[in-house]
Amino acid sequence: MPTENKVVAPLQVERSTVTKLVITGAPNLDPITVFLEDLAPRKGKITVSCWGESWTAYWGGMWDGLTIGQFFCRLDEGYIIGYFQPMLGSQRFSNDALLALAKKSVIDRRRARSGYWEFGDRLDQDDARDLFDQIDELRCVESISVGHQQGELLTDLFGSEWWHLVDDKAVEPNPDWNYLCRIIAAVQQALGQEQQQVAA
């Protein structure tokens, strides 16, 4: 059976200059590899790798006259993380913080003299003891989504929209955020040193 001869259009290939840096000696960090690519005026791309993980960001509207390295050094770490890993937050859910918050809510509501307290109505001694004893059931909660399985207890503790309070207060610093901040700081320091050497 004859085959049709298809005309294949030639692929377009563009060549760009990439600068590679390897950064060592940053405290408590493995070697960091950085690829810098100035694609066009005001357009640049950076890729940072450390211990098997990589993060990439592209900017198509950098400030006039800056290279990608110069631009990167002027950015805030939180802004950079928004490009590198958008879903990463500076805080994460903490079960220990949830348990402490739950105990505080019971104690505060028991101590309230009358009426409504921050997390609900004032508790008498028996209700406070019963609610306090149930707090141990929250040890299995690993995230807010898992917390919905304990929705009735969390409602009794914090009110009908408990997830807002838990999301805001049952948290701890996120070590993944801090780790990436340390990598960004090391890259900015190294790029700053490079720029000073070029300017000298």
Image (tube, grey):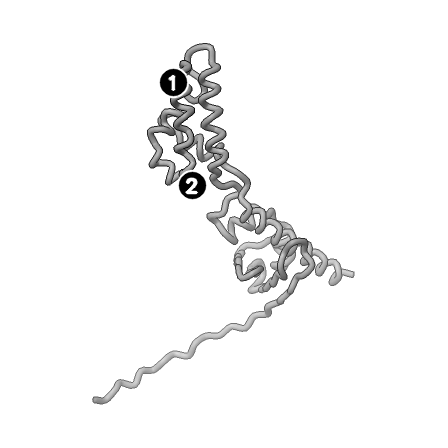
Between the residue at mark 2 and the residue at mark 1, the CA separation in whole angstroms equals 26 Å
Q: Nearer the viewer, mark 2 or mark 1?
A: 1
- Residue highlighted by disc 2: 142
**Of pointers 2 and 1, the one earlier in the residue sequence:** 1
Q: Position of residue 104 (x, y in %)?
A: 49, 24
Regarding residue 47, the answer to whether it shows in the image is no
Per the image, label 2 sits on a secondary structure element best described as loop
Q: To which quarter of the image does residue 106 belong?
A: top left
Dot label at residue 127 = 1
Q: Position of residue 146 (x, y in %)?
A: 37, 40
Which kind of residue does numbered mark 2 sit on? Glu
Q: Is residue 73 above or below residue 169?
A: below
Q: Is residue 28 left or right of residue 97?
A: right
Per the image, label 1 sits on a secondary structure element best described as helix
Picture residue at 50% right of the left edge, 44% below the top: 89
In which quadrant is the C terminus drawn? bottom right
Q: Is residue 104 left or right of residue 189?
A: left
Q: Nearer the viewer, residue 88 or 78?
A: 88
Q: Residues within 10 Å of mark 2 (few under 14, many from 20)?
A: some
